[in-house]
């Protein structure tokens, strides 16, 4: 799964690294993402579009040899018409709603659609469904969805099938079927308590733009939301909400240095934020030093908790202004 710019990390480099490791199937969410990825990867890969084809874009999708995930009757009908117009068959992935009520054809619609020849001009490459609770390994919905999906699969003999996202990949092997669709786990973020042994693959540091001392009564940032009660040493960091660092982290989150927590004080600005470094000895940091926002001392999950969100949102928001360095760590290869 390399949608949303490979979870914010840069689809260009991430997809090419995955291709080097032997990955041949790449999922994105939109046609725009798929066209971009197709330019990055070149021929020889299956690029699958989760949100299907926007009405009117069927021709562009087929010309680019992209494979839509068909989620609705209308999407199915339009893709089938495009295949007829071309006088051949078009590849497709069919999504079935096994209980999440988000995307996919309902189970009970399938027998009639099959009988009506609704798939006649399609070469079905894969059947998929999506788990609502794969992050809760003991949730009864997981096996209920698997059972319903198995029922649907019987109508499409010989077509490969996939149910598991990252959370599902750590469920028992009955959930693995022909393909797992791992996203967040590729980047070392645990999709649930059953995958806590993953090692983080992403770190983020911010440069200190300025250091200052303030005294009792001095305010910090927009709205002067933080007012010092005692002398404080502050560092202004060059990352803000326009870089994807959520405003919710103002007064709630932190940066780290040498493992020590440096609380964010006041509101987060567009391009900067202020942290309290009073707890560090003088000289530990200077202007132009870097502090950690994500890394060994502060996980994606911790930041997500501080921001009242999930790790997926923290990663996918990491903005285009952040400079990205890719480290090929041989110790991570087997
Ligand atoms: C995003 C997505 C995935 C990947 O989910 P992760 O939890 O990141 O592994 C898999 N399948 C579908 C349909 C998705 O939309």
Image (spheres, helix red, strand yellow):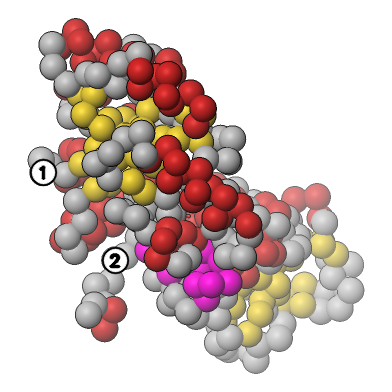
Q: Earlier in the sequence, mark 2 or mark 1?
A: 1
Q: Look at 43% across and 19% down and name the residue there.
A: 112
Q: Which residue is mark 2?
A: 326
Q: Secondary structure at mark 1?
A: loop
Relative depth, front residue between 49 and 211: 49
Q: Look at 44% across and 75% down and name the residue there.
A: 198
Query: Which disc, if any, is residue 134?
Result: none
Gap between marks 2 and 1 measured at Cα? 25 Å
Q: Look at 75% across and 50% down and name the residue there.
A: 222
Q: Position of residue 191 (x, y in %)?
A: 52, 63
Apparent side of residue 192 relative to residue 13 in the rendered image (left or right): right
Q: How many neighbours does mark 2 have within 10 angstroms: few (below 14), some (14-19), or many (20 or more)?
A: few
The magenta region covers 185-196
93 falls in the magenta region: no
Q: Which residue is mark 1?
A: 44
Name above or below for residue 109 compared with residue 204.
above
């Amino acid at each position: 799964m390399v949608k949303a710019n490979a979870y914010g990390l840069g689809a260009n480099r991430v997809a090419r690294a995955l291709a080097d490791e032997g990955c041949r199937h790449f999922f994105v969410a939109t046609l725009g993402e798929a066209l971009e990825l197709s330019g990055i990867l070149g021929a020889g890969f299956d690029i699958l579009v989760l949100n299907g084809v926007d009405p009117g874009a069927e021709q562009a999708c087929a010309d680019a040899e992209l494979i839509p995930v068909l989620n609705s009757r209308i999407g199915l009908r339009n893709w089938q018409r495009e295949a007829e117009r071309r006088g051949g068959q078009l590849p497709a992935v069919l999504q079935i709603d096994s209980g999440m009520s988000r995307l996919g054809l309902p189970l009970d619609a399938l027998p009639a659609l099959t009988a009506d020849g609704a798939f006649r001009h399609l070469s079905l490459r894969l059947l998929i469904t999506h788990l609502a609770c794969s992050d809760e390994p003991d949730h009864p919905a997981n096996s209920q969805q698997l059972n319903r999906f198995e029922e649907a699969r019987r109508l499409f003999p010989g077509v490969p099938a996939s149910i598991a996202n990252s959370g599902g990949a750590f469920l028992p092997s009955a959930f693995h079927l022909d393909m797992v669709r791992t996203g967040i786990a590729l980047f070392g973020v645990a999709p649930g308590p059953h995958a806590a042994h993953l090692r983080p693959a992403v770190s983020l540091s911010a440069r200190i733009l300025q250091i200052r001392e303030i005294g009792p009564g001095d305010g910090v940032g927009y709205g002067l939301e933080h007012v010092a009660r005692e002398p404080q040493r502050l560092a202004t960091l060059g990352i803000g909400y326009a870089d994807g660092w959520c405003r919710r982290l103002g007064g709630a989150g932190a940066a780290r240095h040498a493992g020590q927590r440096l609380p964010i004080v006041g509101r987060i600005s567009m391009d900067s934020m202020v942290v309290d470094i009073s707890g560090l000895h003088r000289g530990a940091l200077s202007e132009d030093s870097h502090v950690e926002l994500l890394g060994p001392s502060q996980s994606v999950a911790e930041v997500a908790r501080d921001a009242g969100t999930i790790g997926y949102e923290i990663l996918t928001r990491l903005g285009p202004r952040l400079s990205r360095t890719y480290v090929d760590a041989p110790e991570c290869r087997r």
